[in-house]
Image (cartoon, helix red, strand yellow):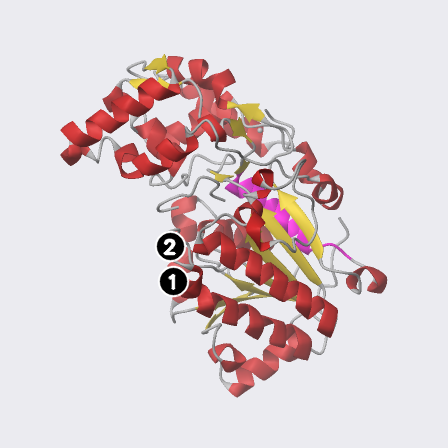
């Protein structure tokens, strides 16, 4: 990857989120940009960012990072005139990763998120250096694809709103995609839309952890109390996840490309960031179970689900040891025989980002490292987790939300 001009400046939203913090860490370490400007909702976010990075073992060198308090939905992003004027004169890249993550809200609740997209388009359009934009979308924007069309979801504009998963979060992501497509067509703003799939825990370090309230960590963390693990994950059995730290690197690799004028005047670019090398839970669950203390029984999904449902009725106060109880509806949903999960083409993304092609499938070693990060006893086999960390720190050829949806990104 060619280095960008050292005068390039990137504006980043969502830096305090999980993916955002790893993306920022990679930006700083790769030093592809002369300056990084983080737009946050509150003042004092430099201290908050430092705390987040420290807890995840990320860099705390913010010497070329500026933190500005902003409101993306407001005129001029809620900045004072001088700050906004400086942005328009400096910015060469805009990375928009901030989004409200709540899968219970209707699409109307995401109006301010969409207003923020409009305001960022304004910034790009008014920028003196013709800033390029990268938007982090979700595979949820196309998770109904298999109910309507055959084949994989293509890396292109989706004009049929029915392909979005029927929830406000996913629908708002697709609507935002269409807003950015329109900005590209009408204003010539260079746009890249990244549809991101399931984000898993980090693998480069034992620091940090996959949020234990999400669906898969909840399932694994409940195994001790239930004494069981399902032999399949139903509609989610195909594992095409990407570790959050590797994904952060991949997105920096994508954003920091040196592109010709011809390339930046083309139509909106769509890239799918799901792991092109699939694994299956049903193929590795026995090994996962054998490394867990005490060893849970691997049972058919229906039996595991019934055990979880019974526990929800009989032991509702034990949610701390049975976090999967909070997601019973979700687990019932993915277990439906008619549930479909589409595959996503990654041909273009693999060409743009060679690291995506090289990352390898999710492995047992990665799983054991995540379990260690959650504080689980993996039968004293710490060497496996340590090996996972060592492998993942070398070249990327090693083996691979609060209330998640069936197709959570």
Residue 356 horizontal side relative to residue 69, left or right: right
| Closer to the camera in the image, 383 or 401 | 401
Instruction: Residue 241: give x, y in percent of width and height.
Output: 54, 35
Residue 164 rendering spot, x and y as whole percentages: 54, 50
Mark 2 surroundings within 10 Å by alpha-carbon count, few (fewer than 14), some (14 through 19), many (20 or more): some
The residue at the point 54 percent across, 81 percent down is 83
Tag 1 near tag 2, CB within 8 Å: yes
Can residue 208 be seen here?
Answer: yes
| Picture layout, residue 113 above or below residue 281 | below
Relative height, residue 52 to residue 150 (above, below): below
- Give the labeled residue for mark 1: 47
Q: Residue at x 61, y 59 (%)?
A: 177
On screen, residue 184 above or below 204: below
| Picture quadrant of residue 266 | bottom right
Residue density around tag 1, few if under 14, some if 14–19, many if 20 or more, within 10 Å: few
Membership of 249 in magenta stretch: yes
Q: Secondary structure at mark 2?
A: helix
Q: Secondary structure at mark 1?
A: helix
Q: Nearer the viewer, residue 372 or 34?
A: 372
Q: Nearer the viewer, residue 288 or 83?
A: 288
User: Residue drawn 56% across and 31% down?
Assistant: 392
In the image, residue 319 sits, relative to residue 2, either above or below, namely: above
User: For residue 114: magenta?
Assistant: no
Q: Residue at x 36, y 32 (%)?
A: 332
CA separation in Å, label 1 and label 2? 6 Å
Q: Tell me the magenta residue range.
A: 243-258
Residue 75 percent across, percent down from the top left: 51, 81
Location of mark 2 (residue): 51
- Give the overall secondary structure of the magenta segment: helix
């Amino acid at each position: 990857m060619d280095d960008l001009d050292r005068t390039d400046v990137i504006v980043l939203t969502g830096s305090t989120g999980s993916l955002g913090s790893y993306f920022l860490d990679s930006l700083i370490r790769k030093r592809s940009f002369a300056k990084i400007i983080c737009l946050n909702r509150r003042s004092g976010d430099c201290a908050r960012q430092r705390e987040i990075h420290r807890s995840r073992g990320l860099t705390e060198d913010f010497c070329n990072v500026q933190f500005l308090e902003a409101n993306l939905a407001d005129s001029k992003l809620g900045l004072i005139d001088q700050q906004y004027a400086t942005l328009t004169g400096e910015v060469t890249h805009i990375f928009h990763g901030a989004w409200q993550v709540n899968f219970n809200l209707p699409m109307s609740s995401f109006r301010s998120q969409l207003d923020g997209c409009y305001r960022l388009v304004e910034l790009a359009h008014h920028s003196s250096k013709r800033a390029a934009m990268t938007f982090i979308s979700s595979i949820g924007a196309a998770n109904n694809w298999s109910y309507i069309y055959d084949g994989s979801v293509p890396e292109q504009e989706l004009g049929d709103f029915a392909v979005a998963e029927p929830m406000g979060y996913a629908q708002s992501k697709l609507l935002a995609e269409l807003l950015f497509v329109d900005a590209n067509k009408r204003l010539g703003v260079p746009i890249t839309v990244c549809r991101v799939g399931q984000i898993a825990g980090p693998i480069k370090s034992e620091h940090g952890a996959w949020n234990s309230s999400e669906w898969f960590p909840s399932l694994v963390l409940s195994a001790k109390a239930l004494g069981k693990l399902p032999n399949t994950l139903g509609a989610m059995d195909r594992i095409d996840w990407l570790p959050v730290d590797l994904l952060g690197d991949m997105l920096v690799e994508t954003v920091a490309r040196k592109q010709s004028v011809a390339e930046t005047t083309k139509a909106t670019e769509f890239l799918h960031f799901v792991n092109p090398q699939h694994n299956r839970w049903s193929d590795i669950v026995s090994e996962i179970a054998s490394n867990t203390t005490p060893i849970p029984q691997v049972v058919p999904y229906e039996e595991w689900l019934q055990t979880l449902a019974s526990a929800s009725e009989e032991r509702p106060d034990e949610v701390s040891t049975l976090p999967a109880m909070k997601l019973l509806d979700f687990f019932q949903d993915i277990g439906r025989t008619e549930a479909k999960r589409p595959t996503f083409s990654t041909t273009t993304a693999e060409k743009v980002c060679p690291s995506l092609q090289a990352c390898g499938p999710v492995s047992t070693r990665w799983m054991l490292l995540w379990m260690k990060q959650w504080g689980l006893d993996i039968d004293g086999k710490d060497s496996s987790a340590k090996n996972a960390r060592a492998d993942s720190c070398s070249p990327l050829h090693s083996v691979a939300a609060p209330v998640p949806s069936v197709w959570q990104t």
